[in-house]
Amino acid sequence: MYNSFRTDLADERRDIYRKANKMEEIDGIQSQEEEFNKHIKKTKVNVTNETGEKAIGKPKGTYVTIDINNLKVAQEKEIEEAATCLSQEIKELIKKHIDEKAEILVVGLGNEYVTPDALGPKVIADIDVTRHILQYMPQYLDENTRSVTAISPGVLGTTGIETVEILKGIVDNIKPKLIIAIDALASRDLNRISKTIQLSDTGIIPGAGVGNKRNEISINTLNIPVIAIGVPTVVDSSSYNTKNNKG
């Protein structure tokens, strides 16, 4: 495996490995690019075997990267289009693993007191949770409403508990069928900060992109599927300088 990725994005890891080994494509990696519209581009990277896993350091599964141009000056219509694109990809990944009414747990990873790591907790504040309403006041919800719960478990430095240990307790008690984990990511490209979204159905290893790996949050540790959604909020300075110096 190439050891100097310093990025969480599968498409960047693929490009780094290809350039380092001077190859067109990697055995065990399938990729596809498409335009959602003139402002939004999607890149799908499928890791299909162990060779692909070892090459880019990502487990087998699907990785979807959505790049949104001019997001800082986007108008309301363009923001709605980006939301529609993201929604479609999330629904596709969910449908691969559970049915339409199966319960979901949304997890906001990160430290709410550290700006580049606060994405997960901030998203949790805007999640429409429904489990308690379905239990106690179901008459107020559509009969097709999915049960949704949400948690921001904090970080090891403030809780003294590994996130996966907290989630195991929650999963054992409320028994969701799938987890959606939201986290800040690392990229090698400054232009992707807050303008790129990566989705995957392989779980997540918090801190992997910046060399501070925590315990894996995935079907392997929690026994239910984990969809990861992340946005790059940091760039490793040495990676960025190396990238630019090479042109």
Image (cartoon, grey):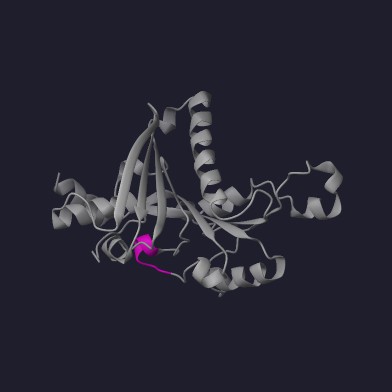
Q: Quadrant of residue 167?
A: bottom right
Q: In this view, does 18 lie above or below 3?
A: above
Residue nearest the viewer, comparing 202 with 206: 202
> Could you tell me residue 124's position as x and y percent?
61, 51
> Could you tell me residue 118's position as x and y percent?
51, 53
Can residue 187 be seen here?
no
Q: 13 left or right of 176?
A: left
Q: 138 left or right of 33?
A: right
Whether residue 87 appears in magenta in the rendering, the answer is no
User: What residue appears at the point 53 percent right and 30 percent down from the top-left corner?
Assistant: 80
Can residue 137 be seen here?
yes
Which image quarter is the N terminus in? bottom left
> Could you tell me residue 15's position as x and y percent?
24, 50
Q: Is residue 223 above or below residue 193?
A: below
> Could you tell me residue 197's position as x and y percent?
43, 45
Q: Quadrant of residue 36?
A: top left
User: What residue appears at the point 16 percent right and 53 percent down from the top-left corner?
Assistant: 23
Which image quarter is the C terminus in? top left
Total marks drawn?
A: 0
User: What residue appears at the point 49 percent right and 36 percent down from the top-left corner?
Assistant: 85
Whether residue 212 appears in magenta in the rendering, the answer is yes
State which region is magenta: 208-213
User: What residue appears at the point 38 percent right and 44 percent down from the top-left corner?
Assistant: 193
